[in-house]
């Protein structure tokens, strides 16, 4: 495949705490760079990019806390029908960014326009059209890693739709469903190509958006944890987990991911309590849903946050949770998270629906057994290398927890099978699928 210049959006790369889509974007940039392509990253940060090189670089890495002003968006909409030019950010290396929030994936150039993606959404609401953007010597292909109402001029525009959960399980997301549908419908009609990450998502895109099969390519994703994490001696990792968290290796269950309805955390907690397990249940994840009912057994009542942004705890329920050894951690950096995953007896991830289900493969690559659900892409990704359950059946999840606690042979089987399964989603396999995709587009 001949070398091309490819643009990748920084919509999720800019998030303070990464998401599965951010991981996808990083892996995409990494693998395309390995294939010899030039990568342009386009961000829509709240910071400005001006003529002063050093301050532009400083502003880019400054996370900032200011909210988007309505007046700024209104002003931008006056000229947005003419399109928006994004400016190149001069990354000179004068800012030490090795541990910055915006640690950069492989790239050739970086561009930014203040509030670009917010403007794109408002432009779409007001004018009913995708915002057009441009920059000097643009990429030949713009790969938008999220369904955004924006396109790059003078380029082939392809869009990754990871799933259609807002349409398939509308009660599990906070998206404006009408706006979301209009966005993905227009992508289905006008994109040069659509990329997705599982056969389950591909079927949804074809069925719900009436897209012909030849216009959708499933590349899956890559599971690509750093070798420095994978190659650490187990004794060293176990000592870290025990000293920092007080957790005995191989003697706790683990859920990690966003705490939102589709992750099924409420049923996981109920199933764990019903299993009467002797091992703790550790829950690692940010509360991303306005209603905390999934955490009511952890002492977080349902309902809106009160003054100060805190959800008050119910002491009686908190006491029950502690008695049952349920531990919640909101966020861990990748190195610590990987250690906790690796030392868990089993990762419990029976989500209601996933476009891909990256936590399943991350656990498998780290050699940890997995319980997951039979819905969405989960069985497609896990194959027969995980303990599959009906995610709506609390009793089935509880039984799986009991089996994984009491039968070391079953745990050993899924640990070994999982390691082999993860190899199917290696960076090398992913690179082959990307090569085939871009060759077809050419």
Image (spheres, helix red, strand yellow):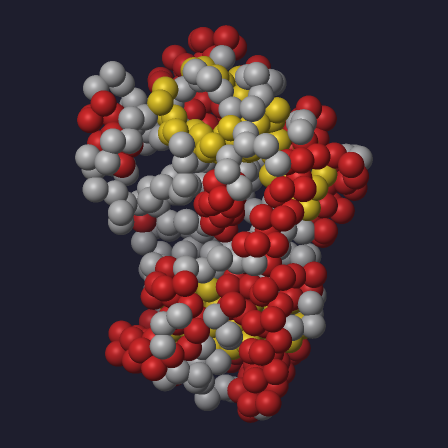
Residue depicted at x 21% and y 19%? 52
User: Is residue 310 shown to the viewer in this render?
Assistant: yes
Residue depicted at x 67% and y 51%? 198
On screen, residue 91 above or below 357: above
- Residue 76 x/y as whole percent: 41, 14
User: Is residue 180 shown to the viewer in this render?
Assistant: no
Of residue 119 and residue 1, the one placed in the foreground of this image is: 1
For the C terminus, give its image quadrant: top right
Position of 265 with respect to 250 (left or right) is right
Q: Quadrant of residue 410?
A: bottom right
Of residue 302 and residue 389, the one placed in the foreground of this image is: 389
Position of 70 with respect to 53 (left or right) is right
- Residue 164 x/y as whole percent: 65, 44
Position of 426 with respect to 240 (left or right) is right
For the N terminus, give its image quadrant: top right
Of residue 28 and residue 362, the one placed in the foreground of this image is: 28
On screen, residue 362 above or below 218: below
Of residue 370 and residue 184, the one placed in the foreground of this image is: 370
What is the count of numbered marks?
0
- Residue 172 x/y as whole percent: 59, 51
Residue depicted at x 45% and y 60%? 225
Residue depicted at x 51% and y 64%? 362
On screen, residue 411 above or below 177: below
């Amino acid at each position: 495949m001949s070398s091309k210049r490819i643009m990748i959006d920084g919509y999720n790369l800019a998030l303070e705490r990464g998401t599965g889509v951010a991981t996808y974007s990083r892996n995409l940039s990494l693998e395309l760079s390995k294939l010899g392509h030039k990568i342009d990253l386009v961000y829509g940060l709240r910071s400005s990019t001006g003529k002063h090189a050093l301050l532009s670089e400083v502003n880019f890495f400054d996370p900032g806390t200011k909210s988007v002003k309505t007046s700024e968006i209104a002003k931008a909409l006056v000229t947005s029908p003419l399109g928006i030019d994004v400016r190149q950010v001069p990354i000179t290396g004068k800012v030490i960014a090795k541990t910055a929030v915006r640690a950069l994936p492989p790239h050739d150039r970086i561009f930014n326009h203040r509030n670009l993606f917010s403007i794109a959404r408002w432009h779409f609401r007001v004018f009913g059209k995708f915002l057009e953007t441009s920059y000097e010597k643009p990429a030949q292909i713009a790969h938008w890693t999220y369904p955004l109402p924006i396109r790059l001029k003078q380029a082939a525009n392809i869009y990754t739709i990871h799933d259609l959960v807002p349409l398939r399980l509308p009660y599990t997301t906070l998206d404006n469903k009408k706006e979301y549908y209009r966005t993905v419908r227009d992508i289905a009609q006008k994109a040069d190509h659509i990329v997705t990450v599982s056969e389950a998502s591909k079927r949804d895109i074809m069925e719900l958006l009436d897209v012909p099969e030849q216009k959708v390519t499933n590349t899956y994703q890559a599971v690509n944890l750093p070798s420095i994490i994978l190659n650490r001696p187990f004794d060293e990792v176990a000592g870290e987990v025990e000293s920092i968290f007080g957790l005995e290796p191989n003697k706790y269950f683990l859920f990690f991911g966003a705490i939102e309805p589709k992750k099924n955390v409420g049923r996981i907690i109920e199933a764990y309590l019903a299993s009467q397990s002797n091992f703790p249940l550790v829950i690692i994840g940010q509360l991303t849903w306005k209603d905390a009912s999934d955490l009511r057994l952890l002492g977080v009542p349902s309902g809106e946050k009160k003054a100060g942004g805190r959800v008050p705890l119910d002491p009686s329920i908190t006491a029950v949770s502690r008695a049952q050894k349920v531990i919640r951690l909101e966020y861990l950096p990748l190195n610590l998270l990987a250690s906790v995953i690796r030392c868990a007896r089993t990762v419990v991830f029976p989500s209601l629906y996933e476009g891909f289900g990256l936590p399943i493969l991350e656990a498998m690559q780290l050699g940890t057994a997995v319980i997951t659900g039979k819905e969405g892409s989960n069985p497609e990704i896990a194959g027969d290398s995980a303990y599959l359950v009906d995610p709506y059946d609390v009793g089935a999840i509880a039984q799986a927890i009991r089996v994984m606690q009491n039968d070391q042979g079953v745990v050993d089987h899924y640990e070994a099978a999982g390691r082999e399964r993860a190899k199917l989603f290696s960076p090398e396999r992913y690179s082959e699928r990307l090569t085939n995709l871009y060759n077809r587009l050419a």
